[in-house]
Image (cartoon, rainbow, N blue to C red):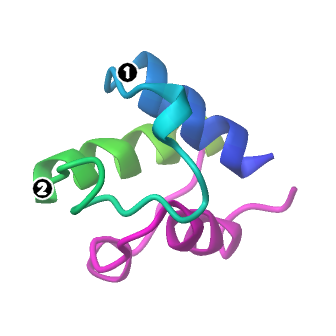
């Protein structure tokens, strides 16, 4: 599932505590992400799923759920 991949990237590549990651987790407020962090996450997701996403659209998301929903547009689970 996409959420599992997102969690794996956050935990293993970005050193985020897995217990702090839920669908409601806010990237900016809860994880203190900036635009560079979001870009790194998106790049990792693109690599993992072998897709290209619309960065302008994805950089505006603010929760883990929104990231998952955006990636679903590009990936068939």
For residue 58: magenta? yes
Q: Nearer the viewer, residue 18 or 11?
A: 18
Task: Give the labeled residue for mark 1.
Answer: 13
Provide the residue span drawn in magenta.
50-77
Q: Which mark is residue 55?
A: none
Quarter of the image where the C terminus is located: bottom right
Q: Quadrant of residue 29?
A: bottom left
Task: Give the labeled residue for mark 2.
Answer: 34
Q: Nearer the viewer, residue 52 or 14?
A: 14
- Is residue 16 positioned above or below 69 on the image? above
2 or 1: tag closer to the N-terminus: 1
Which residue appears farthest toward the right when viewing the image? Answer: 77
Give residue 49's position: percent from left, percent from top.
Answer: 64, 44
Give residue 64's position: percent from left, percent from top.
Answer: 51, 60
On the rendered structure, is 45 left or right of 39?
right
Q: How many marks?
A: 2
Give the secondary structure at mark 2: loop
Q: Quadrant of residue 41?
A: top left
Q: Which residue is pictured at 32% across the width and 26% down the height?
A: 14
Give residue 65's position: percent from left, percent from top.
Answer: 59, 67
């Amino acid at each position: 599932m996409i959420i599992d991949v997102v969690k794996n990237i956050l935990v293993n590549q970005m050193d985020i505590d897995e217990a702090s990651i839920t669908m409601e987790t806010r990237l900016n407020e809860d994880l203190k992400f900036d635009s560079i962090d979001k870009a790194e996450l998106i790049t990792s997701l693109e690599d993992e799923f072998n897709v290209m996403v619309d960065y302008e659209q994805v950089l505006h998301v603010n929760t883990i759920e929104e990231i998952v929903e955006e990636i679903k547009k590009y990936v068939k689970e």
